[in-house]
Image (spheres, rainbow, N blue to C red):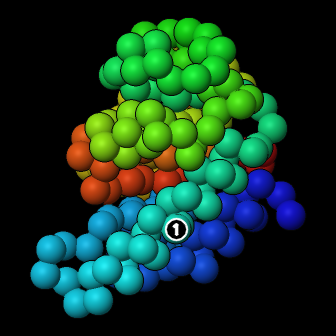
Amino acid sequence: MSHSKHLSEIMSRWQSADIRRREDALSVWDLRLPRLFSRRRRQRREAVATCRRELLTALLASTGPIFLMHKEPPKEYAIPGNWRSAGEASWVVPADFNLDDPVVRHWLFDLGDWRFYSSVGPVAGKWPDVFRCGAAELLAWMSANAVRVLIESFHDDTEWVVAQGTADT
């Protein structure tokens, strides 16, 4: 199964009120944790967490470089691995990056405000506000910047945007 098909399969399998396409025919998805008084909140949170985990695992297992942008440098939090700078607040994700490391979990999921992306090289310049722009606008920007996959976390990690460009990985 190609990488694009795998990510699409994950998103389709978990599709719900909390995990949905932004626009019907486009590969931009919004993932939101259910609100405090939502029905079946615990089960819904677990479904979102499992989907997120599958997405990150699939992205990190893909071929080609994976980049991470985070306002907090990995060295400041003693994140294990050989981190190479790829620009301002951007690093190449090391091959041995472990999502299960407690320090990594805190750095990503307690702090939020990060983006993983797959591309032939680091992207410089202005990024769109993925939480506010339209799906077509985001996909056009990704195409223009050779970004194949983007997973971005809001500052409190309650929302994610997952977008797949047209290039297969």
Going 31% across and 80% down the picture, which residue do you hit? 42
Residue at the extreme bottom:
39
Going 51% across and 23% down the picture, which residue do you hit? 79
**Front-most of residues 3 and 108:** 108
If the image is split into quadrants, where does the C terminus sit? top right
Above or below for 53 versus 89: below
Residue at the extreme front:
102
Any part of residue 19 in sight:
no
The type of residue carrying mark 1 is Thr
**Front-most of residues 100 and 129:** 100
Going 33% across and 22% down the picture, which residue do you hit? 71
**Front-most of residues 17 and 95:** 95
> How many C-alpha atoms fall within 10 Å of the one at disc 1: few (<14), some, or many (≥20)?
few
- The image quadrant that residue 25 belongs to is bottom right
Residue 116 lies left or right of residue 152; in this view the side is right
What residue is disc 1 on? 50
- The image quadrant that residue 23 belongs to is bottom left
Any part of residue 95 in sight:
yes
**Front-most of residues 152 and 34:** 34
Q: Position of residue 105 (x, y in %)?
A: 44, 42
Question: SS at mark 1?
Answer: helix
Residue at the extreme right:
1
If the image is split into quadrants, where does the N terminus sit? bottom right
Q: Position of residue 101 (x, y in %)?
A: 54, 39
Q: How many marks?
A: 1
Above or below for 96 versus 1: above
Going 61% across and 61% down the picture, which residue do you hit? 54
Residue 57 lies left or right of residue 41; in this view the side is right
Q: Position of residue 66 (x, y in %)?
A: 65, 31
Q: Position of residue 51 (x, y in %)?
A: 53, 67
Above or below for 116 versus 23: above
- The image quadrant that residue 33 belongs to is bottom left
